[in-house]
Image (cartoon, rainbow, N blue to C red):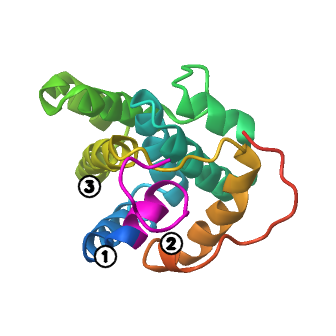
């Protein structure tokens, strides 16, 4: 139960956004700009970074929401998504993405934890300056989003089966007002993370 009366029963950040549309709009635009395109990083890679940072911040709602979106983009490869989400170095991802995830993890600790050697390793593994930029901004934004969700005690569904239908909707339509203004889509039974 949220710590404040948000006047709705929507889960996670959706309920908070519905409570405060004037802050929801710029937050939704930021999320869309960071996650819902493939300029440099693929959309799946962007969602994996968001899920990993949310895992490091122990934000149940965000880590599972964004892991499900990544899973949608990766044709249901839940094992890979779970490995990346939890920081398993054995995950079958590119050395570039591994280096960028290390940068994201440093940002989660604090901006000054990122060192020139972290950036140079990312470049050595093939990351462009745009990809490094976006990784840092995604990690920083998710520290804010995670703290928003958990700092207000947003409703967090424990039923992981409720996450895939919304993930499909976000993957197909992006982030924006529909996140909090449309009902939870029905979906087929999907094995949750």
Disc 1 to disc 3: CB gap under 8 Å: no
Is 130 placed left or right of 10 in the picture?
left
Residue 151 image point, x, y percent: 32, 42
Residue beneath label 2, please? 179
Kindly give the residue lying farthest to the right in the view shown: 189
Between the C-alphas of marks 2 and 3, the distance is 27 Å
Residue beneath label 1, please? 25
| Residue 125 vertical placement versus 3 (above, below) | above
Q: Tell me which corner region of the image, top left, top right, bottom left or bottom right, holds residue 53.
A: top left
**Residue at image x 72%, y 34%?**
79
Q: Nearer the viewer, mark 2 or mark 3?
A: 2
**Residue at image x 26%, y 55%?**
130
Work out which quarter of the rendered image holds the C terminus and state it. Answer: top right
Is 183 placed left or right of 190 in the picture?
left
Q: Which residues are magenta?
A: 1-18
Disc 3 crowd rating (10 Å Cα; few below 14, some 14-19, many 20+) is few
Q: Nearer the viewer, mark 1 or mark 3?
A: 1
Disc 2 crowd rating (10 Å Cα; few below 14, some 14-19, many 20+) is many
Q: Is residue 40 magenta?
A: no
Res 130 label: 3
| Residue 105 vertical placement versus 156 (above, below) | above
């Amino acid at each position: 139960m949220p710590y404040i009366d948000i006047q709705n029963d929507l889960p996670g950040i959706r309920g908070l956004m519905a409570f405060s549309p004037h802050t929801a709009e710029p937050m939704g635009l930021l999320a869309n700009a960071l996650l819902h395109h493939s300029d440099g990083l693929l959309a799946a890679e962007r969602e994996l970074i968001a899920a990993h940072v949310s895992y490091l911040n122990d934000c149940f709602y965000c880590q599972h929401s964004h892991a499900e979106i990544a899973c949608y983009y990766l044709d249901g490869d839940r094992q890979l998504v779970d490995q990346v989400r939890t920081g398993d170095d054995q995950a079958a991802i590119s050395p570039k993405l591994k280096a960028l995830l290390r940068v994201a993890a440093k940002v989660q600790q604090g901006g000054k934890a990122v060192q020139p050697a972290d950036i140079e390793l990312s470049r050595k593994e093939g990351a462009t300056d745009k990809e490094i930029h976006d990784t840092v901004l995604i990690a920083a934004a998710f520290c804010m989003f995670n703290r928003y969700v958990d700092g207000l005690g947003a409703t967090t569904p424990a039923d992981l089966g409720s996450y895939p239908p919304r993930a499909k909707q976000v993957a197909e339509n992006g982030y924006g007002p529909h996140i909090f203004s449309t009902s939870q889509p029905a979906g087929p039974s999907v094995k949750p993370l």
